[in-house]
Image: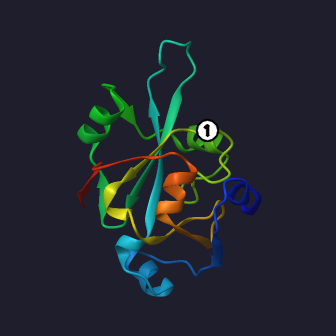
Amino acid sequence: MRSAAAARGLDIEIRERPQARSLHEAAELLGLQPSDIVKTLVVKRSANGSGDQPEYLFALVPGGRSISWPKLRALVGVNKLRLPEPELALAATGYERGTIVPIGSTTDWPVYVDETIVGRRVAMGAGTHGYSLFVDADALIRAYDATVADISVPE
């Protein structure tokens, strides 16, 4: 994780954190607002005519919001997107659900970031349970040439 971040010029901080039962509890434990905790969702899209292999993307959405499927489909230019089964997400990224992050993923899938995290320092999955990764969102966006757009709705 650290070497993958360094290879992209990212300054990250990884902190151990206790288990939390909710977004609000996690934010309180980390001393953050819920919207400062970013969920990284791996999203499966239909194969692009280049064979039968599925393709994926990362969608980064702040706590308290969820993916707007219509907005994300329109942005990506496809009719069908979905969350893959846990074993497919693991195979696509090398990370278990709840720990997924673009940094250090086994494949560099395209990254789509909700516009509400621009300009903030955020916490996200760290590739393993019990840890949080802190990073400057703008640096992450630059490092992954991420697409920034309105891709979420309040939960």
Q: What element carries label 1?
A: helix
Q: Can you give x and y, in whole percent of width and height, for residue 36 in the image?
A: 41, 73
Q: In this view, does 111 lie to the left or right of 2?
A: left
Kindly identify the residue that appears in the image at 62 percent across and 44 percent down. Answer: 93
Q: Mark 1 Cα within 10 Å, few/some/many (few <14, many 20+)?
A: many
Q: Can you give x and y, in whole percent of width and height, for residue 98 in the image?
A: 53, 59
51 and 119: which one is in front?
A: 119
Q: Mark 1 points at which residue?
A: 92
Kindly identify the residue that appears in the image at 64 percent across and 62 percent down. Answer: 10
Q: In which quarter of the image is residue 86?
A: top right
Q: Residue type at mark 1: give it.
A: Ala
User: Quadrant location of the N terminus?
Assistant: bottom right
Kindly identify the residue that appears in the image at 58 percent across and 59 percent down. Answer: 99
Q: In this view, does 145 lie above or below 23?
A: above
Q: Can you give x and y, in whole percent of width and height, for residue 46 in the image?
A: 44, 23
User: Quadrant location of the C terminus?
Assistant: bottom left
Q: In this view, does 96 lie to the left or right of 138?
A: right
105 and 90: which one is in front?
A: 105
Q: In this view, does 79 lie to the left or right of 142?
A: left
Q: In this view, does 70 lie above or below 59?
A: above
Q: Is residue 87 left or right of residue 44?
A: right
Q: Is residue 140 above or below residue 55?
A: below
Question: Outermost residue toward the right?
Answer: 3
138 and 132: which one is in front?
A: 138
Q: Can you give x and y, in whole percent of width and height, for residue 79 in the image?
A: 30, 25
19 and 153: which one is in front?
A: 153
Kindly identify the residue that appears in the image at 73 percent across and 54 percent down. Answer: 7
> Across the whole image, how many numbered discs are drawn on residues?
1
